[in-house]
Image (cartoon, rainbow, N blue to C red):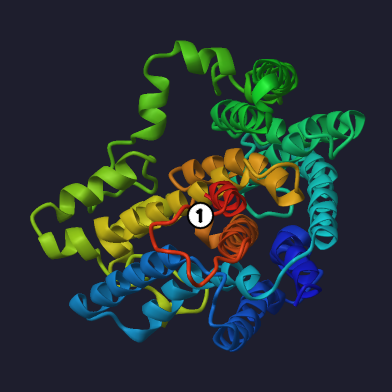
Amino acid sequence: MQSLIYVMIAAVMLAPHLASPFGNNILPVYAKYLPDVLSMVVAIYVVAAGTQQRFRYLNGKYLVAFGALTVVIVCGVLVNDDQPGPVLSGLRYYLRAIPFFFLPVVVDFGERQIVKYLVMIATLSLVQVPVAIYQRYTIYIWSRFSGDDVRGTLMHSGVLTIFLISVLCVATALMLRGRLGKMAYGALLLLLLIPMSINETKVTVFLLPIGLLITSIMSAPPKKRIRVTMAGVALIVVAGAVFIPIYDFFATAHVYGRAEGAEESIGQMFTDKNFFGNYLDAKTQIGTDKTEAGRVDALTAPLASFSDDPVRLAFGLGVGNASTSPLGAQFVGRYQRSYGIFASETTAATFLVETGVLGLALVLLLHFLVLQDTLVLARQGEQLLGVIACGWTGAWIVITIGNFYIPCHIYDSVSFLPWFFSGLIAARRQRLLAEASHAVPIPLDVGRHAERPAGLRRARQRAR
């Protein structure tokens, strides 16, 4: 199973691209379903091995959260009388990455193995640089203006940006904790900034500083927190000095001879008081003829529509009922025409429309539970997963925010890999709790109110 992760990493970062016209159809079209096949294999293994091990390294809070989400999904299907096709299509996107979250519960991944995974992810992240540059060149050749087609091999410009920011967060933690050389980190930072700059993803201006600053604070030892935090601020300044000029060069009028004012520079975005309002909220309503919705009205319009129906407000329209599907017309939801414009905008909007307020709340709860374990593990000394957790704190917050910006759940790279690394951290935290409970044996004749041995108390405090 440990070797299967290499296949998964390659599949989620390369297969959808190579099996599409953007990758010249190097692989057959069915290759894009390789991550789904791997997920089914892992699911079978997790159930078999977990039953044998009694899932002793799975914290009960995740069982409660996933169980409650399952109940909400089932209720939504029942009250909306969902057809099997949309349900299967919706569940595919909702659940396909989750087996990789549970895999570390039944398989103990060693440090050497995790290092190899990180090296492979970093290598494939660097592959995005020449691919993105070629895509930008193609846009120039065809006299097109938008950077949306600069997507690397990850199939979406926003996904590319969020993924690379997450990689930089983990790399920053490894560098600040002495696990990655400063020269290697500097080269990685400068190279990975290139795709983020030339794809004109505006949210980079916010997510990159958030991720790097949180990572720097989490990676700082208590006695060096101010100095390391200042180093993080310096990294943000360097990143901005690279990102802003490149972004402005490709986004503003003098590129391709486009009309003056065709796009906004970074400075104009922050000085134009109406820009972000119009960009985030397109004032799109249910039944509109518009082809796009903003990130804000993708949430507010369905909420307003459901406000008079408590059942739909709670459980939504049903899994897959507002989504399209690559599997065929029989898998397209019945409400896709009226609500699809909102559900397709972001992951948060998808869960709100199809699983209601309860479903979205439970998804956010799962993100909070992972963040909780990540914060605990980040305080666990200098072990590799503890260092990764310092960077994963920033990365996970960026990904959580990203769920309100793009439909993360339908893109393999920002669903499979984040849930796998979250599973590594959650399982490691539970192993620490298990080790703490057996750290010092308690004599049978010790009273229930007697003082516990100091070693056991310290071990449990570390695990918490």
- Residue at which label 1 appears: 452
Give residue 17's quadrant in the image: bottom right
- Residue 195 visible in the snapshot: no
> Across the whole image, how many numbered discs are drawn on residues?
1
Residue at the spot 33% in from the left edge and 65% down from the top edge = 322
Considering every residue shown, the one lying at the far front of the view is 445
Q: Up-down: is 169 above or below 99?
A: above
Quarter that holds the N terminus: bottom right
Give residue 32's quadrant in the image: bottom right
Q: Residue 314: image x %, image y %?
A: 20, 61
- Residue 41 visible in the snapshot: yes
Left or right side of 344 for 423? right
Q: Residue 44: image x %, image y %?
A: 60, 86
Left or right side of 35 for 332? left
Residue at the spot 54% in from the left edge and 77% down from the top edge = 55
Foreground pick, 229 / 164: 229
Q: Up-down: is 283 above or below 52?
A: above
Q: Residue 255: image x %, image y %?
A: 70, 22
Q: Residue 40: image x %, image y %?
A: 60, 82
Foreground pick, 41 / 403: 41
Residue at the spot 55% in from the left edge and 65% down from the top edge = 442
Q: Residues within 10 Å of mark 1 (few under 14, many from 20)?
A: some
Foreground pick, 393 / 70: 393
Foreground pick, 458 / 40: 458
Mark 1 belongs to which amino acid?
Arg
Q: Up-down: is 127 above or below 145?
A: below
